[in-house]
Amino acid sequence: MATFPAFLDTNVLFGFQLNDVLLALAERGLFRPLWSADVLEELRRNLVAHGVRSTNVERRIFAMTRWFPDAAVTGYGYLVPAMTCDPKDRHVLAAAVRANAEVLVTFNVKDFPPESTAPYDIEVVHTDAFLLDQLNLFPGLTAGAIRQLVADYSRPEMSVSDVLVRLADAGVPRFAATVRTHL
């Protein structure tokens, strides 16, 4: 199975279960995750601002970079001024362009209007739609990833239903509902 490059915006990496699901799918080869140092720094700031202990934040980011060492996109700074999307997200689009990402996965689709991405042939996809695509293309692998995550959660233990409720609350309700039919 050939994996395609998908740039992950900070907001899709923020929620614990959502992050776990995305990276479990990437680990199974469904797509190649991409992010930048700026995205990871924004993730770090946002998690700490929301009360996550800095040691837990550092552990999470360390694990992400350790498991996906080729996810880091560099050398995109010179592209930032040319980006025409929302100013606060220009670094995101610039890194996605530099990485030749096929999709940019985000909750903030409106911040990347088509005229800002069309010249670079990057599709901006809402996280819910992205995960539904993975489920439609790879139902067994996707369902298996969810089952494995549930089995791995020990503190606290969670059921499939618990994880799906948290995913729905994290902004991917259609994915959570559809996964339920596969499990």
Image (tube, rainbow, N blue to C red):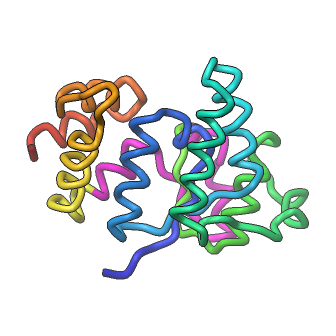
Residue 3 horizontal side relative to residue 72, left or right: left
**Which region is colored magenta?**
108-134
Asked whether residue 129 is drawn in magenta, I would say: yes
Q: Residue at x 30, y 58 (%)?
A: 134
Position of 131 relative to 48 (above/below): below
Q: Quadrant of the N terminus?
A: bottom left
Indicate the position of residue 65 as horizontal and vertical percent values: 60, 59
Indicate the position of residue 77 as horizontal and vertical percent values: 87, 62
State which quadrant residue 42 falls in: top right
Indicate the position of residue 118 as horizontal and vertical percent values: 64, 64
Asked whether residue 27 is drawn in magenta, I would say: no
Q: How many marks?
A: 0
Q: Nearer the viewer, residue 75 or 100?
A: 75
Magenta stretch prevailing secondary structure: helix
Q: Nearer the viewer, residue 88 or 54?
A: 54
State which quadrant residue 78 falls in: bottom right
Q: Residue furthest bottom?
A: 2
Indicate the position of residue 41 as horizontal and vertical percent values: 75, 43
Position of 60 relative to 48 (above/below): below
Q: Residue at x 90, y 57 (%)?
A: 81
Residue 133 horizontal side relative to residue 92, left or right: left
Q: Residue at x 69, y 26 (%)?
A: 48
Q: Quadrant of the C terminus?
A: top left
Q: Residue at x 43, y 54 (%)?
A: 23
Residue 151 horizontal side relative to residue 87, left or right: left
State which quadrant residue 121 falls in: bottom right
Residue 45 horizontal side relative to residue 2, left or right: right
